Image (tube, rainbow, N blue to C red):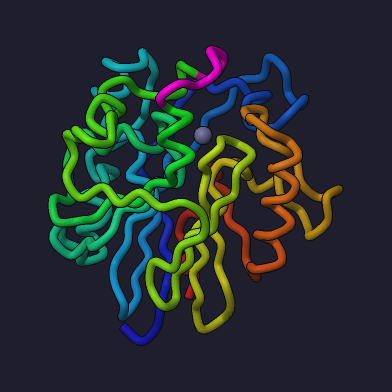
Amino acid sequence: MASTRVIPLDCGYITDVEHSGQQYLRGFGQHICTQAVLWLVQSVHGTAVVDIGPGTPELVKERHGRTLVQAPDQHPLAALERLGVKPEDVDVVVQTHLHWDHCLGLDLELFPGADIFIQRAELAYAAAPYPAHAGLYDATVLHRLLPAFDRGYRNVKVIDGDFKLFKDCLLMKTPGHSPGTQATLVTTDSGVVAIASDNLPLQASWSGRTLEDWIPPGVHVNLDEFYASMTRLTAAADVVLPSHDASVLGQIFD
Ligand SMILES: [Zn+2]
């Protein structure tokens, strides 16, 4: 492997998602499918999975009554195996935030040797979200993360703000969508690639580098923070990638 690279992997899609939850004040009553993407970051300094995702159709149905359309070869381990990545090769799992569609797969304990990186603000908010956001979190996952002094998961690494994960990989705290949403910025040979997470769920949510070019996510806790986070992210990145858009699939960013 010559260089650092970012590879989005197809883990299926969730059906019947309200559009206005993805793009603020847009598409009321329209239902769309949202892509489940597991991001593989490969570097000489380490291997990271960014967002373990919703896991399996069974988990999603059982816990949240929703439909994840996922073929067997779209299971996270199958998708990684096709690229020659074994579970024990994964050093780090970055949780961009703790909404269930991004973290329910933690329950599968796919990468027993990996450290799990989560922003402190996200853990704090998940413990006591505003009621409007409560359904976005998963009780079982939270029961294993909280309280902090009695975790069910091993290897949880709580961070508070920007954090250099590897020499060529920075976790940037980008609140807005949720208090502890974090982006992952990877320095590749062709520039800095930003995995933006749910501040930008869809490709159409980011069409340029000014405020006019961004559509906030319908689900958010703070628009001031969203715009400040996007300004910072945009200044630091050459390529900005949305979280739930199938257009990123089939590409390698290196
Ligand atoms: Zn989210």
Identify the residue shown where x is 32% and y is 23%: 60
Rendering coords of residue 209 (x, y %): 79, 60
Pick the quarter of the image with the N terminus. bottom left
* Residue 145 vertical position relative to residue 114 in the rendered view, above or below: above
Identify the residue shown where x is 69% and y is 33%: 222
Rendering coords of residue 163 (x, y %): 46, 62
Identify the residue shown where x is 48% and y is 40%: 121
**Would you say 82 lies left or right of 238 here?**
left
Q: Nearer the viewer, residue 103 or 245?
A: 103
Of all residues shown, which one is farthest toward the bottom? 2
Identify the residue shown where x is 51% and y is 50%: 182
128 in magenta = yes
> How many numbered marks, from 0 up?
0
Q: Can residue 246 be seen in this view?
A: no
Q: Which of 225 and 99 is in front in this view?
A: 225
**Would you say 3 lies left or right of 237 here?**
left
Rendering coords of residue 173 (x, y %): 55, 52
* Residue 124 vertical position relative to residue 18 in the rendered view, above or below: below
Q: Nearer the viewer, residue 70 or 151?
A: 151
Q: Which of 61 and 135 is in front in this view?
A: 135
**Would you say 188 lies left or right of 217 here?**
left
Of all residues shown, which one is farthest toward the right? 212
139 in magenta = no
**Would you say 229 lies left or right of 46 here?**
right
What stretch of residues is rendered in magenta?
127-133
Q: Is residue 167 visible?
A: yes
* Residue 216 vertical position relative to residue 155 in the rendered view, above or below: above
Rendering coords of residue 196 (x, y %): 57, 52
* Residue 60 vertical position relative to residue 43 in the rendered view, above or below: above
